[in-house]
Image (tube, rainbow, N blue to C red):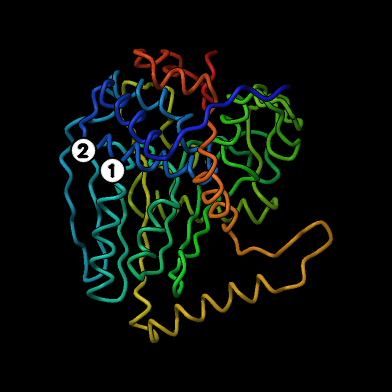
Amino acid sequence: MTELEMVRVTESELHELIQKKLEKAGLSSLHANTVAETLAFADARGIHSHGAVRVDYYAERIAKGGSNLTPNFKFNQTGPSTGIFEADNGVGHYASNEALKEAIRLAKETGIGVVGVHQMGHSGALAYFVKQAAEADMIALSVCQSDPMVVPFGGAEPYFGTNPIAFAAPRKDHTPVVFDMATTVQAWGKILDARARNVDIPDTWAVDGSGNPTTNPHEVKALLPIAGPKGYGLMMMVDILSGTLLGLPFGKHVSSMYTDITAGRNLGQLHIIINPSFFTDLDKFKADVNQMVEELHNTKPASGFDQVLYPGELSEIVSEKYKKEGIPIVKEIYDYLVSETIHFNRYDKASAFGEQD
């Protein structure tokens, strides 16, 4: 496969294009602004799997009534440090961001804030949320369930979703440490991005309909857990924390992104926010995290590496690069964003991998 033509844009330009498209689909400017901010954030850090490539899907779901455009958001505090944010099938990015604010508030008051988001839509890259908490001098852990599209270790059919985990911690005089990962070898969005770019994928990412490794992103029928049984265990943990704990469907019962795009979703997410000042001196904590990063940077690199980076640091390096060069967006996606087309009507009734049967 060959690379596709790319267009370079700034983060603010991309934000504006995405927001206008979502507003045209029917989303309010307030909610569209947050969704656009999270998608542009992802693309600006090289997380293209959770950026503009998703707009067509979101626009179709919004336009066809699958997202509640006037959700009745409600925060129910269930204890001194806990609560449930009722998302009422509003767009997940906005709902998750509002829930994060409540979790940070609780952590400032009691030392910890644990807030579950109930009945939300897809919320994009979790790094966006945990980074905000770290910028408020909090430690953050966020987990979210997703569509069943991963074969369990030893299994031949999907059961769990990619079930991501994101973590962030503040650093002294530097941007926070932010780490965001799927519990699969790669997130489904990476497959989606490879399809858009018309490039092959490594044969360790996914399997075809026969359960055999594939390098063709268009043949993917299931993803593989990272590190076999270890990733399998992590995805089960995430599903319990962000699904079962909130009284939501779990595992293979999690609502699909595509089966009926006109119907609401029933996803869960959990923010765990910790206030370091309740456990140690905040300045010392931030200095120690910074020292850790510096010591990692000074660790002797292995053959083929220039320097040891902290987990997630590559996204910050890419961000600095894109600020100078512009964010690369597949021209086909860019052309869609600047067009009058709301969506291409290709996701409703599709498989878990966005394919029409």
> Label 2: which residue?
30
Secondary structure under badge 2? helix
Q: Quadrant of the N terminus?
A: top right
Residue occupying the point 28% across, 70% down: 107
Between 291 and 237, the residue placed more toward the observer is 291
Mark 2 or mark 1: whose residue is earlier in sequence: 2
Secondary structure under badge 1? helix
Residue occupying the point 71% across, 64% down: 307
Q: Position of residue 134 (x, y in %)?
A: 39, 65
Q: Crowdedness of circle 2 by 10 Å Cα count: few (<14), some, many (20+)? A: few
Q: Quadrant of residue 36?
A: top left
The amino acid on which the numbered mark 2 sits, given as a three-letter code, is Leu
Establish if 287 lies above or below 94.
below
Q: Quadrant of residue 299?
A: bottom right
Establish if 92 lies above or below 101.
above
Q: Are marks 2 and 1 in contact (CB under 8 Å)?
A: yes
Q: Quadrant of the C terminus?
A: top right
On the rendered structure, is 8 left or right of 195? left
Establish if 217 lies above or below 240.
above
Q: Position of residue 281 (x, y in %)?
A: 38, 86
